[in-house]
Image (cartoon, helix red, strand yellow):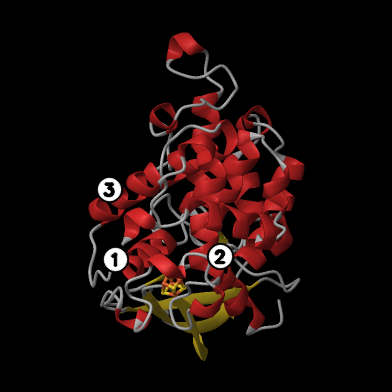
């Protein structure tokens, strides 16, 4: 049963087997926060690249608060889910407000409760940063931990509240940071969704689902949405494309790209292709229409999403 999960086995395994990730070499809560926000929706291998760029350019909350949000978006291009970059910039501005104005005077707050008041910080991120950077005795709950809990306890569809209760019950309070990372590492590298490596698992003796791990938890049925868009890819006499900045909402918020909309007027333009792009819950199909414009923009001067890069590539930009 889960209450017998061996803390010492898991911690020893983590000390021995953890991946060498750059944010595991720092106690700086700002740098740990950057890693947690990136990893919410970006794979670890790609996240390292973006984390290194962000940490180099924005080593402190103040350095990001002093920058324009467009610069943060520019660094974020290709990482996807651009609203994260906008919220991170808003977070840095709030952190750098004076205490009397509701800010934190330039330093990230230390407790999970205070971190939760910042833009873009949910319970998971608050618990991860507070426990890893400051050792606060608070349990993390994420998809990896949910999977470990479901298999350890033979639960088909545990709610996040139930996972939270379990995570608090098994929490190693003397080193919550390493403990949380150990459980997440187990879910990410051993108790994986499709091929759990039970024979290598340091907590297999307490696992009631070990015989048939793939039954736990049942995958959530995610309905994929289809989005059909039209895009006007127009170039000036120098071969530069017309680029506009997207509004502050939506999947490409704040990024730059050719004009694009579900009902874009493409009268007089020529259809040159269809670009397909897949996000986690969405399939996007873009009809690309070609034409000319008076004045384009140098693409390297602005933040461009992966989808827009695919569209520009249709004409060699
Ligand atoms: S024994 Fe297998 S199913 Fe159970 S926690 Fe370990 S890896 Fe996951």
Q: Looking at the image, is mark 3 or mark 2 nearer the viewer?
A: 3
Tell me: 260 left or right of 108: left
Quadrant location of ligand 1? bottom left
The Cα atoms of the two marked residues, 3 and 2, are separated by 45 Å
Q: Is residue 281 visible?
A: yes
Residue 74 is labelled as none
The x and y percentages for residue 134 are 56, 31
Q: Which residue is mark 2?
A: 257
Label 2: few (<14), some (14–19) or many (≥20) C-alpha neighbours in 10 Å: many
Label 1: few (<14), some (14–19) or many (≥20) C-alpha neighbours in 10 Å: many
Q: Is residue 215 above or below residue 14?
A: below
Q: How many marks?
A: 3
- In the depicted view, which residue is nearer to us: 46 or 216? 216
Tell me: 120 left or right of 257: left
Q: Determine whether the residue tagged by mark 1 lies in a helix, strand or loop.
A: loop
Q: Is mark 3 within 8 Å of ligand 1?
A: no
Tell which circle, 3 or 2, labels the residue nearer the N-terminal end: 3
Q: Which residue is mark 1?
A: 153
């Amino acid at each position: 049963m889960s209450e017998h999960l061996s803390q010492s086995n898991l911690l020893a395994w983590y000390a021995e087997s953890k991946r060498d990730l750059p944010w595991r070499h720092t106690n700086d809560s700002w740098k740990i926060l950057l890693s947690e926000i990136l990893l919410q929706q970006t794979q670890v291998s790609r996240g390292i690249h973006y984390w290194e760029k962000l940490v180099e350019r924005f080593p402190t909350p103040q350095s990001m608060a002093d920058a324009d949000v467009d610069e943060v978006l520019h660094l974020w291009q290709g990482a996807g889910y651009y609203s994260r970059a906008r919220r991170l910039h808003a977070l840095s501005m709030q952190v750098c407000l004076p205490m009397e104005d509701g800010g934190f005077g330039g330093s990230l707050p230390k407790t999970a409760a205070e971190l939760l008041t910042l833009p873009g910080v949910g319970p998971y991120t608050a618990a991860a940063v507070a426990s890893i950077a400051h050792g606060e005795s608070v349990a993390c709950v994420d998809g990896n931990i949910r999977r470990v809990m479901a298999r350890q306890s033979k639960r088909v569809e545990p709610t996040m509240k139930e996972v939270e209760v379990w995570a608090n019950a098994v929490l190693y309070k003397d080193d919550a940071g390493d403990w949380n990372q150990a459980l997440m590492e187990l879910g990410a590298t051993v108790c994986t969704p499709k091929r759990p490596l039970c024979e290598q698992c340091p907590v297999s003796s307490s696992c009631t689902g070990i015989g048939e791990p793939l039954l736990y938890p049942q995958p959530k049925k995610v309905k994929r949405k289809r989005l059909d868009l039209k895009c006007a890819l127009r170039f000036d006499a120098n071969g530069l494309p017309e680029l506009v900045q997207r509004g502050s909402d939506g999947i490409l918020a704040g990024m730059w790209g050719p004009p694009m909309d579900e009902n874009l007027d493409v009268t007089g333009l020529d259809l040159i292709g269809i670009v397909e792009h897949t996000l986690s819950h969405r399939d996007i199909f873009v009809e690309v229409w070609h034409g000319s414009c008076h004045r384009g923009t140098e693409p390297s001067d602005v933040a461009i999403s992966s989808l827009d890069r695919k569209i520009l590539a249709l004409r060699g930009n």
